Amino acid sequence: MKFPKVVRVYCPRCNAYTEHTVTIYSHGKRRNLAEGQRRYLRKLKGYGSSRKPKQKRFAKTTKKIVVKLQCRQCGYVLMRTVGRLKKLELAETR
């Protein structure tokens, strides 16, 4: 799917419809010192099976793509889910 690089969307901080630059959101790297990650690694240690069962059949072939919108006036960032897509392409608008 093609998605424009610049969109006019409502900005809650400006309280108006302004132009927003669009980027595809990607999550950051996992932190090994976070409490949840330490707990998970502690559970995996030693004898016994994995903490959660390994998934054998994958029902979903796509992921829900999240788009990051940044206001050009004030810099406020909005996150919007576009939906389930195989690929999202940011295209220039005429």
Image (cartoon, helix red, strand yellow):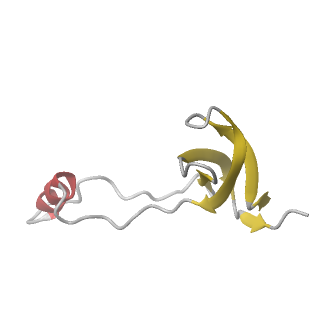
Q: Is residue 89 left or right of residue 29?
A: right
The residue that appears at 33% across and 54% down in the rendered structure is 53
Q: Residue at x 11, y 60 (%)?
A: 42
Residue 1 visible in image:
no
Q: Nearer the viewer, residue 64 or 2?
A: 2
Can the viewer see residue 64?
yes
- The correct choice, above or below, for 60 with respect to 45 in the image is above
Residue placed most toward the observer, 78 or 87: 78
Q: Quadrant of residue 65?
A: bottom right
- Measured as percent of width and height from the top left, residue 29 is found at 35, 67
Position of the N terminus, as image quadrant, is bottom right
Image-based side of 42 in relation to 93, left or right: left
Q: Quadrant of residue 14?
A: top right
Q: Residue furthest right?
A: 94
Residue 2 sits in which quadrant?
bottom right
Total count of labels: 0
Quadrant for the C terminus in the image = bottom right
Q: Is residue 59 above or below residue 32?
A: above
Return the x and y of residue 28 as percentages of the image width and height: 39, 64
Whole-percent x and y of residue 27? 44, 61
Front residue (pair 66, 37): 66
Nearest to the observer: residue 64 or residue 21? 21
Q: Is residue 28 left or right of residue 13?
A: left
